[in-house]
Amino acid sequence: MSSPWSKVANEPVQTASLADIMSEQYAHQLHDKELQQQQKKQTQNQPQQSPTPASYSDVAGTSHSATAAAANDADEWEDYSMLLSGGMDKETLPPEVLKLLEDEEESDAVIAQMLQSQFDHEYNEELRRIERQQNKQSKVTVTLNKFLRSGDAEFLHDTEADEDDEEDELYRQKRDWDRFETNEKMLDAIPKCGFKVDKEGEMITKHDPQLCGVRNAQRVMSFPPEFPTGDGACFDMKLSNKVFNQLKAYSRRGRADRKEKVATAEMGVDAATRLLLYKLINNQILEQINGIISTGKEAVILHANSDASYTGTNEHGHGNGVLMPPELLPRECAIKIFKTTLNEFKQRDRYIKDDYRFKDRFSKQNHRVIINMWAEKEMHNLMRMQSIGLNVPDVVVLKKHVLVMRFIGDNHNAAPKLKDARLTVAELSCAYEEIVAAMHKLYNEAKLVHADLSEYNILWYEDKCWFIDVAQSVEPEHPSALEFLMRDCGNIVNFFEKRGLSNIYTKEQLFESITALNAEKHNTAMLERIHTKGASINQATVPNQQECPDELKPLDYPFELAWEKSQQEREAAAALQELKLEAEAEKLKDKDEDEKLQDNDNNTAKQEQQ
């Protein structure tokens, strides 16, 4: 047996052009030659074998005579290599060849059209899938019909099967969520007693493992995005309460410091506040934010420079809520960022819940809403005080809990507070008169009470007093307005007394000059102390109180004693009312008995006469 790697005899190599090798007819000729050689070998070895297989030309449907001629004489094959090289004109070709070429061109065009149509169909189907995905949970329907390709005409006409497929797909998508909806309806149908009896007489409770398992599977889908829950609706998944609680605890792992992350720190701001500051810069209201001016129990004050190129609207034509024309925009601004936690100032609701302007919007449960309302309240109070001519910072813009105002100071140097200002006696007297006039004007014209007026919330700038921190200001109709006003009067009087200023009002006199009300008659001193925890009734009514030192004596009129006395008076009035009702009932009863006796006497007299 000869090896396939053995050397063969040197035979002359036939030369052929590239056009001949690439010619389709030349390939057919070589294939038929190989078939004929195989046929001769089989005939010599096995003369009684079955007929030889048909040649490639026979399968292709060419004529038998042309095939035989091609097999017997290779020279009779027409060489079409010149067509590939472009050397022969189509007009010189025989009509049979031209017909074959035209048929091949038409078949190629049909195949190309079918491929393009199929491609357009797949493209349109992908658009429909995207459209269904976007409209699955949305209330607004989005259509992509204008992006569909027109080459899908043949497939678009055959829509019956496609519509059935779409309905089946929509059914598959809704089937599992319908399971959740059905489960919720069954749970809602259980009354408040916690159980019900179905038609079959079986009791179903709200703690049913089947119902709770499906509900837990639905709740898992609402976990945070960073928790990989998978598609729990694609199969009949049920989770026990124990497993669900463990997953819930695991999904909240790492969020223990969320409160600190979202809270405004003492010397910094959280991510949401930084985003608001970035928007102020992007909207060309502010040019740069420099640093912290001061911090307090409720807010952080930053210094910023306004953008000189601001024209009143941004590049999109929006005014961005700026409350002053662009030509009046101050060069230096103060940004007051209210702290997003209530740890240091938990009495905000006392100042805002009884204010009729915010009463309907107040919600003690949502601290973020309270803070936003607190900033809005300061903006409205500043604008009201500015309208009557008081010296307050101009409001530039308000964004949630970020309030931008005019900076009171010059060249990044804030104006000093009244307690830190070095004033002469004349300047001190002028400041006192200005503050007293401002308090009178604020109460009678602006219909406001500052509620936190002191030397810490008054700035001294350009020989004038500027009033700040007015978020807690209330109207005179507020239940605690007189109490707040009396406290403000005490703060102002105490400050100027410590500075040694003479000929000033007392606390009660200042209160009367502002409100024209008698302090003793309206008992404002007691209103000021009404929220202070006083002594109990036992301590307040202990004998020999005159011998007790003054610093150990309880309050003269504590709130608890007043409350207990009022409750005793109510109970006494209710008991008296009950006694009156009982007396009236007895009178009616006696009257009814007298009427019955009189009727009996009349009946007896009539019977005797008869």
Image (cartoon, grey):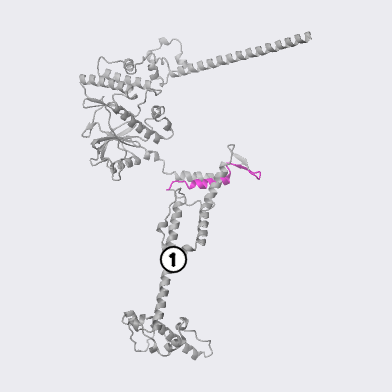
Is 230 placed above or below 119 here? above
Q: Pointer 1: residues within 10 angstroms few (<14), some, or many (20+)?
A: some
What type is the residue that disc 1 sits on?
Answer: Gln
Asked whether 273 falls inside the magenta stretch, the response is no
**Horizontal relation, residue 29 to residue 245: left or right:** left
Point out residue 64 in the picture as x, y percentages from the top left corner. 47, 86
Is 184 placed above or below 599 here? below
- Disc 1: which residue: 118
> Do we see residue 316 in this rendering?
yes
The front one of 503 and 590 is 590
In the figure, residue 426 lies in which quadrant?
Answer: top left
**Horizontal relation, residue 150 to residue 407: left or right:** right
Point out residue 248 in the picture as x, y percentages from the top left corner. 48, 44
The front one of 358 and 160 is 160
Secondary-structure class at tag 1 = helix
Residue shown at the point (52%, 59%) measured from the top left: 164
Judged from this view, the residue extending furthest toward the right is 610
Asked whether 218 falls inside the magenta stretch, the response is yes
Point out residue 473 in the picture as x, y percentages from the top left corner. 35, 26
> Do we see residue 37 in this rendering?
no
Residue shown at the point (73%, 11%) measured from the top left: 600
**Horizontal relation, residue 187 to residue 352: left or right:** right
Point out residue 173 in the picture as x, y percentages from the top left corner. 50, 53
Quadrant including the C terminus: top right
Judged from this view, the residue extending furthest toward the front is 610
In the figure, residue 575 lies in which quadrant?
Answer: top right
Quadrant including the N terminus: bottom left
Is 566 placed above or below 289 here? above
- Magenta range is 198-225
Residue shown at the point (33%, 42%) measured from the top left: 275
